[in-house]
Image: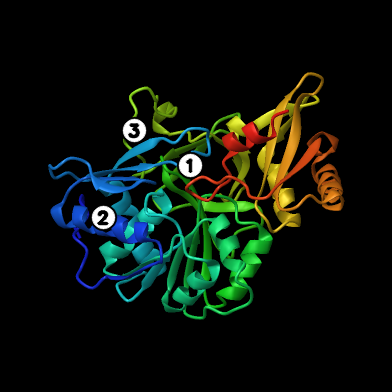
């Protein structure tokens, strides 16, 4: 494997694509870019070469959870460095069979797919398949990359056992205890590793079975973490992106060379990182600071369906919390959710409204589309 550029996929490395024709087209385009050594441009519309001149870089899209989808430009070397870490630390090899549950236009699925192809491992792209069909295909897999939302959806297929899965890598959001327990039961022989990162940074920290509850783990190998006085997380590593493709987007702050992805947290004495939440999602309710992620953690502990917390302007309290839950209206459940938030976080965190929707709008990463939700529930 070259130190700076992706190699062409090895013959026979690709196993299968799911039922969605878009998967096959995206995978064919990815293989073509690798074979011709062309820069890769990935989005939810598909994959295409970025021009016709060889180049060791790629563009992929952020999830849009911050309100705007950004085009991330990074070098091949920034991903190759972590491929080597995963190979050496976790024993990944050409003997493995990878599975991804998201579209290749999403950075997590793209990353995992290229990692598999660089190792010469098998690859299954299962985006768009039903949970039951995904489960059937995963009987052939040893390595699974997914977001928490994709893992929760996988559990909807009911009880089962995927004894051949030995590695589960979960990123793109917090893995709640109920989902972790469900995946541990479904994949009894798997090491479940939850990693914290961003499209701009790739890996920042990674957690395993020895990580204290509530932590996202210690710094990923090669990452240097620094927190400022306000708890803003700064990252220096060989995995950082080069910048945004959009000319109007300024890069994230990088004081003294430490890129700040916008999260607030703290470190314990052993170097375990704990997240408070996104700086942009900290709101003031009745003169008290509240991270909406804390509310969402309470919701996730009580309802298996997708849910989200919003803060809408309120003339008296600064903001009012609104909980949005997928499903039929349920007054008793709404009362339980308010009570649980009040008991766990305080009166200011209890949702003023609980809104039930038949289906939550989702981003391409399978996270709730917070901007669309705010428009739907605004008074």
Label located before the other in sequence (3 or 1): 1
Give the residue drawn at x 58%, y 65%: 209
**x then y, percent, for residue 261:** 48, 36
Against 161, residue 241 (above or below) is above
Q: Secondary structure at mark 2?
A: helix
**x then y, percent, for residue 341:** 80, 44
**x then y, percent, for residue 255:** 44, 27
Against 85, residue 331 (above or below) is above
Give the residue drawn at x 52%, y 66%: 130
**x then y, percent, for residue 183:** 59, 69
The answer to which of 227 and 86 lies nearer the viewer is: 86
Q: Is residue 84 visible?
A: no
Label 3: which residue? 243
Q: Is residue 49 visible?
A: yes
Of the numbered discs in the image, which one, if any, rests on residue 30? Answer: 2
Residue 55's image quarter?
A: top left
Label 1: which residue? 225
Count up the numbered dots: 3
Q: Secondary structure at mark 1?
A: strand
Q: Judge left or right: residue 48 versus residue 352.
A: left
What's the CA distance linking mark 3 and mark 2? 22 Å
The answer to which of 130 and 76 lies nearer the viewer is: 130
Against 164, residue 217 (above or below) is above
Give the residue drawn at x 40%, y 56%: 109
Label located before the other in sequence (3 or 2): 2
Label located before the other in sequence (1 or 2): 2
Give the residue drawn at x 16%, y 57%: 35
């Amino acid at each position: 494997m070259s130190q700076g550029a992706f190699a062409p996929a090895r013959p026979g490395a690709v196993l299968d694509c799911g039922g969605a024709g878009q998967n096959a087209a995206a995978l064919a385009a990815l293989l073509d870019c690798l074979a011709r050594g062309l820069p890769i441009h990935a989005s939810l519309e598909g994959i295409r070469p970025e021009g016709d001149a060889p180049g060791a870089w790629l563009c992929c899209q952020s999830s849009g959870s911050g309100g705007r989808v950004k085009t991330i430009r990074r070098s091949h070397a920034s991903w190759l460095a972590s491929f080597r870490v995963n190979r050496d630390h976790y024993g990944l090899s050409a003997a493995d069979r990878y599975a991804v549950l998201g579209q290749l236009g999403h950075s997590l699925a793209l990353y995992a797919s290229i990692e598999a192809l660089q190792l010469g491992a098998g690859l299954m792209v299962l985006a768009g398949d039903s949970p039951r069909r995904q489960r059937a295909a995963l009987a052939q897999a040893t390595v699974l990359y997914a977001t928490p939302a994709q893992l929760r959806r996988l559990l909807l297929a009911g009880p089962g056992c995927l004894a051949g899965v030995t590695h589960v890598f979960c990123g793109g959001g917090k893995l709640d205890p109920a989902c972790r327990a469900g995946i541990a039961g479904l994949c009894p022989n798997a090491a479940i590793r939850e990693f914290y990162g961003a499209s701009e940074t790739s890996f920042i920290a990674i957690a395993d079975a020895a990580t204290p509850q509530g932590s996202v783990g210690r710094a990923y190998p090669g990452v240097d973490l620094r927190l400022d006085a306000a708890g803003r997380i700064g990252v220096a590593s060989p995995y950082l992106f080069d910048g945004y493709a959009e000319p109007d987007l300024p890069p994230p702050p990088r004081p003294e060379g430490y890129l700040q992805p916008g999260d607030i947290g703290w470190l314990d004495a052993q170097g375990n990182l704990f997240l408070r939440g996104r700086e942009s999602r900290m709101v003031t309710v009745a003169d008290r600071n509240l991270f909406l992620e804390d509310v969402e953690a309470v919701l996730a502990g009580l309802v298996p369906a997708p849910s989200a917390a919003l803060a809408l302007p309120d003339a008296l309290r600064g903001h009012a919390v609104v909980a949005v839950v997928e499903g039929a209206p349920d007054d008793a459940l709404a009362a339980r959710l308010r009570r649980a938030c009040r008991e766990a976080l305080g009166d200011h965190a209890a949702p003023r409204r609980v809104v039930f929707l038949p289906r939550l709008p989702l981003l391409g990463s399978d996270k709730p589309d917070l901007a669309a939700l705010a428009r739907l529930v605004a008074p």
